Image (cartoon, rainbow, N blue to C red):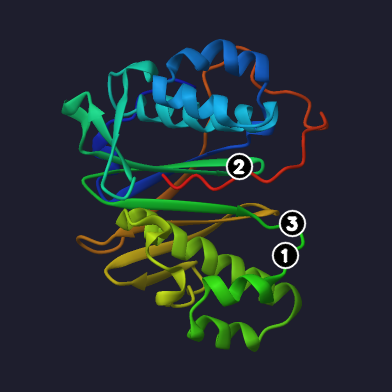
Amino acid sequence: MSLCEPIHPDELVGEVHAWEINPSLISSTELHGCCFDWLSAEERMAWERFSSAKLRHDYLAARALCRSSLSRYAPVKPHQWRFGRGAQGKPFISEPADFNQLSFNLTHTLDLAVLVVGVIVDVGVDAEEISEAVDVSEIERHFLSAEDRVELAHLTGNARTARFFETWVGKEAYLKGCGTGLSRSPSSFTIPQCNLDGLCDYDGWQISMHKPSAKHVAAVAVRCVSGRMLIRWRAAQLPLQRSVVNPTTPVEERRMPHNIE
């Protein structure tokens, strides 16, 4: 598939597409030169608030992923999209109104950005970078339900850490899909463990787990309307002339703050 090959929205019937990129493999000069002008005034203000060049780069890459990927499904240029927010902050397409049946959700963490796109269906996505040491015992008291903590108590080592992150991203993807974000406590509910295919059902939603890389875990949540949806993961490329940089180029090792979108 070429960088700008269009995708007919009919391809989203029964499917949800998840587009992923690694911002660290994108040239900052090329990204800024091509994509910064796509941003709205609100997005530019958000970009300016980040405290380092690395964080600004990752934010811009995520927004560019969002705008360029949506433009695959409609004859709309990336800079022409306008977004609104629901009562709890969930984004939606406000203009062009002809394409507001497209639904989307965006997340980014260290070395990964993911956009999920559907049509006439509620969607949410979350991802975490899992290579850093995490004190699961400290976090689980505030984030997990009593049932979650009982399950984790029977696991040790890497299995315990992996299950913790699966629970984390599953809950956040669901909350983002619902449009509540963290205004609803993640400790107030329990999502079942996914089956061998990485799928589970909760509260009328389909939760799908995915490993974009050895150091990431991601979850997509889709409100079930008529049976299961196919979650189709795709490697995205931004429409840059020279987008890939040497992967050994040093980058600032700093975790991205969560983007509750």
Identify residue for label 2: 112
Q: Callout 1: few (<14), some (14-19), or many (20+) C-alpha neighbours within 10 Å?
A: few
Whether residue 78 is situated above or below residue 139 in the rendered picture: above
Which is more toward the observer, 179 or 199?
179
Q: Residue 97 location, x and y as percent?
A: 17, 27
Which is more toward the observer, 237 or 63?
63
**Left or right of residue 255, residue 228 in this image:** left
Mark 3 element type:
loop
Q: Residue 42 location, x and y as percent?
A: 40, 25
Residue 40: in sight, yes or no?
A: no
Q: Are marks 3 and 1 in contact (CB under 8 Å)?
A: no
Q: Residue at x 54, y 48 (%)?
A: 258
Which is more toward the observer, 147 or 249?
147
The amino acid pointed to by label 2 is Leu
Report how far apart the C-alphas of labels 3 and 2 lie in the structure.
13 Å
Q: Disc 1 or 2, which lies upstream in sequence?
A: 2
Task: State the quadrant of the C terminus.
Answer: top left
User: Residue 242, labelled with which disc?
Assistant: none
Identify residue for label 3: 131
Whether residue 229 is situated above or below residue 27 in the rendered picture: below
**Left or right of residue 130, residue 61 in this image:** left
The amino acid pointed to by label 3 is Ser
- Mark 1 or mark 2, which is nearer to you? 1
Q: Disc 3 or 2, which lies upstream in sequence?
A: 2
Q: Which residue is drawn at 54% across and 57% down?
A: 210
User: Residue 134, labelled with which disc?
Assistant: 1
Report how far apart the C-alphas of labels 1 and 2 lie in the structure.
19 Å
Q: Callout 2: few (<14), some (14-19), or many (20+) C-alpha neighbours within 10 Å?
A: many
Q: Which residue is drawn at 66% across and 14% down?
A: 29
Mark 2 element type:
strand
Q: Which residue is drawn at 51% across and 17% down?
A: 35
Mark 1 element type:
loop
